[in-house]
Amino acid sequence: VCMTETAEVLHLLLGFMHRQRQPDLFGYGSDVVMSLAEAAEKYVVYSAMEICRLHMFRLANTHPKEVFVYASKHNYSELLDKTAPMTLTWDAKTAYKRLCDRIFAIWVNTSMCSIHLL
């Protein structure tokens, strides 16, 4: 079986599946935490999903676009609301590639409204 996740991410993910204390994610870089968050959603590892969502809140100010994409894919409205204002400088072509059609339409509408307010 070919998996797209790194060995480090899979090792962390398995740590959430075993009967042991859950891994402490504070010592890991944002790229590992974001990859783990996606893997937890992909493989529906409930014990990891919520802790990863909380860590994504922590990363929202430093990685708003990545967190916005994650939130849009997994329907986390609070994260969308938190990161949306920080994505308004995103160019539309890139946003279109990264977002589903429904979220892209909302993002464009929000972007246009913010331009008119200026």
Image (cartoon, grey):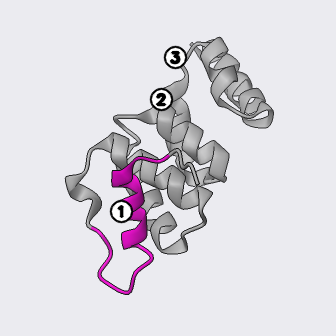
**How far apart, in angstroms, are the residues tagged by discs 1 and 2?**
29 Å
Q: Can residue 36 be found in the magenta stretch?
A: no
Residue 57 seen in the current view: no
Q: Identify the residue at the far front of this view.
A: 1
Picture quadrant of residue 42: bottom right
Q: Callout 2: helix, strand or loop?
A: helix
SS at mark 1? helix
Hey, which quadrant is residue 23 in on the image? bottom left
* Residue 102 spot, x, y in % from top left: 79, 36
Q: Is residue 114 left or right of residue 11?
A: right
First in sequence, mark 1 or 2: give its number: 1
Residue type indicated by callout 3: Thr
Residue at x-position 41% and y-position 42%: 60
Q: For residue 86, which numbered disc appears in the image?
A: 2
Residue 14: percent from the left, percent from the top? 41, 69
Q: What residue is disc 3 on?
A: 89
In the picture, the quarter occupied by the N terminus is bottom right
Mark 1 or mark 2, whichever is nearer to me: 1
Q: Residues within 10 Å of mark 2 (few under 14, many from 20)?
A: some
Tell me how far mark 3 sits from mark 2, CA to CA: 7 Å
Q: Residue at x 52, y 54 (%)?
A: 39
Q: Which portion, as a residue range, is magenta?
A: 5-23
C-beta proximity under 8 Å, tags 3 and 1:
no
Residue 24 versus residue 99 in the image, above or below: below
Name which residue lies at 61% across and 54% down.
76
On whether residue 17 falls in the magenta region, the answer is: yes
Residue 52 x %, y %: 43, 59
According to the picture, the residue beneath numbered tag 1 turns out to be: 12
What is the three-letter code of the residue carrying label 1?
Leu
As rendered, which of 43 and 90 lies closer to the eye? Answer: 43
- SS class of the residue under badge 3? loop
